[in-house]
Image: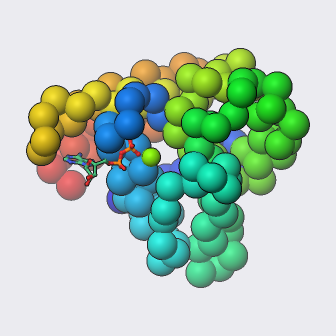
Amino acid sequence: MRLGAWLQPGDVLALEGDLGGGKTTFVQGLVAGWGSAEHVVSPTFVLVNLYRRDDGAPFYHMDAYRLSGPAEALDLDIAAMWEEAPLVVEWADIIAEALPEERLTIRFAWLGELQRTLAFLPTGERPRHLVRRLRAAILRGL
Ligand SMILES: Nc1ncnc2c1ncn2[C@@H]1O[C@H](COP(=O)(O)OP(=O)(O)O)[C@@H](O)[C@H]1O
Ligand SMILES: [Mg+2]
């Protein structure tokens, strides 16, 4: 919920990890934090979902699972998406070369039925700032 509220256009979150890792569930929290009451579903077949906040501000949610690679992502003009809004991508490793170098990679791993681990791997100043802020909020217990 926190992280979603801090996102702004230009922010790219690259989610990696196997099926069942918790990527779509994480996006539900992000979108709620962003301030949209819209229902989040996996965009595996439609490729991209758009959620709007009450004030109309957009948030893009892409699933790269069915893309052949970075070229197909560029055909979808994903740069225009992240310039307009925050963009979160599931299966981001498939299209890594089409994403900006400055991004927040989050790697999901399945530990057991009720346990997941998330590794936050920021590259660039803005993603590092987001992770520092998140860590501080968690340590304060907020
Ligand atoms: N942090 C979590 N802890 C425990 N279970 C989770 C967590 N995140 C997701 N799940 C459960 O794992 C399953 C797969 O989640 P999902 O978000 O669809 O994964 P993905 O999008 O990575 O394939 C769902 O049943 C979901 O309820
Ligand atoms: Mg998913």
Q: Name, please, the residue furthest toward the bottom.
A: 54
Q: Nearer the viewer, residue 140 or 86?
A: 86
From the viewer's perspective, tell me whether residue 109 is left or right of residue 69. left
Residue 17, visible in the rendered structure? yes
- Above or below, 47 against 128 in this view is below
Q: Quadrant where the C terminus lies?
A: bottom left
Q: Quadrant of residue 22?
A: top left
Which colour assignment does the render follow? rainbow
Q: Quadrant where the N terminus lies?
A: bottom left
Residue 32 in picture, x, y percent from top left? 42, 67
Q: Residue at x 27, y 39 (%)?
A: 136
Residue 83, visible in the rendered structure? no
Q: Residue at x 72, y 24 (%)?
A: 69
Residue 23 in picture, x, y percent from top left? 40, 43
- Above or below, 68 against 87 in this view is above
Residue 34 in picture, x, y percent from top left? 50, 63
Q: Residue at x 69, y 76 (%)?
A: 56
From the viewer's perspective, tell me whether residue 42 is left or right of residue 21. right
* Number of numbered markers: 0
Q: Residue at x 57, y 49 (%)?
A: 44
Q: Nearer the viewer, residue 113 or 56?
A: 113
Residue 62 in picture, x, y percent from top left? 62, 47
